[in-house]
Image: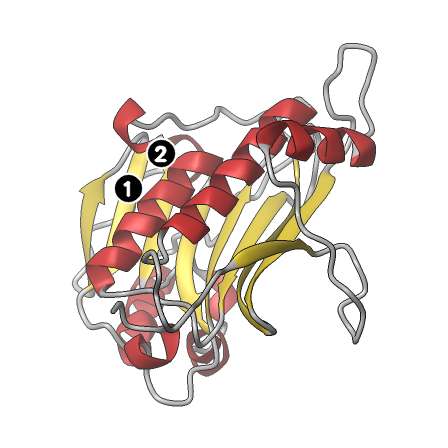
Amino acid sequence: MKQTVAELLPENDEYAYIMMVWGSRRERPEEIAARGWATMAALKDAIPANDPQVPAPVWVDASQDLYGHDRPPAPSSLPAMQDQTLERADVDDLGNLVGGVRMGSYLISGETDVASYSGNVGAGRTYVGNTVTIRFLPDYPLGTEEDVLRLFRTLVAIWAPDTARFGTYLTSRQVHDYAKSYAGYMTWVSQSGMGTPPPLKSATAEPFGEGTLLTVKEWSVEGVRNLHEELLAAGVPGYVSENINPQSVPRFPSSTS
């Protein structure tokens, strides 16, 4: 069996997450739906078949009332996901999104939430950026660090953000000014949006698609703190400062998309 979030992460860590952010990007609802559908498939497929820790995981819609009421199923096919996205979207005469569209679903096993994804995506002009956050709760079987890296690569290739990082409840609370850098246990930054990170003592760097993948050498809150402080000392920005400008969408090898 794969290690769960609770088994992989430091004691008292409550959850892990992948946050992805990118600038203005003109997309059609169908493209957004395809990215959402691929995200749901990747998160569910990463759970081993017949895993006794997470029996019969299913996706439910995140837009409904979650407090004591029935939770309707999420779209069960790409066409259904496209229909739902079109219902929520505001498009122009050419079929492109005028603003961002809300997306999200919860992955549950029995009555237990094990993961979720949510975001506001597809905005062609935005100051704050398009965002997707994937959350892994204690019972989700993340596996080893290598398993996390494999899933991280897959999700980054799906959304092609400017920045992405794998962090946790503890890193976001125990690392001072955490949001001022893009430090995480794992981080990806696009060349077009963020440039190339400087040489770092606390993390290994490797090219991935049109960008750089960083992995901390010490898998701990302290390891993330060391990377965070190195990035701040180097004056590396933690986010794209001009999200309103049209984005050059990063590309990835076809084998990872």
The residue at the point 36 percent across, 30 percent down is 257
Instruction: First in sequence, mark 1 or 2: give its number.
Output: 2
Look at the image and tell me whether residue 160 can be seen: no
Q: Residue beneath label 1, please?
A: 212
The residue at the point 72 percent across, 34 percent down is 85
Q: Nearer the viewer, residue 92 or 126?
A: 92
Q: In this picture, is 209 found above or below 2?
A: above
Q: Residues within 10 Å of mark 1 (few under 14, many from 20)?
A: some
Q: Nearer the viewer, residue 38 or 15?
A: 38
Rendered location of residue 10, percent (x, y): 32, 83
Q: Residues within 10 Å of mark 2 (few under 14, many from 20)?
A: some
* Residue 191 disc label: 2
Specify the quadrant of the image occupied by residue 127: top right
The residue at the point 51 percent across, 46 percent down is 40
Q: Amino acid at mark 1?
A: Thr
Q: Give the CA distance from mark 1 to mark 2.
A: 7 Å
Q: In this picture, is 43 found above or below 170?
A: above
Please state if 18 lies on the left or on the right of 106 as rendered.
Answer: left
Specify the quadrant of the image occupied by residue 62: bottom right
Name the residue furthest top.
Answer: 94
Q: Amino acid at mark 2?
A: Gln
Rendered location of residue 251, percent (x, y): 37, 25
Contact check, label 1 and label 2, Cβ < 8 Å: yes
Name the residue furthest bottom.
Answer: 12
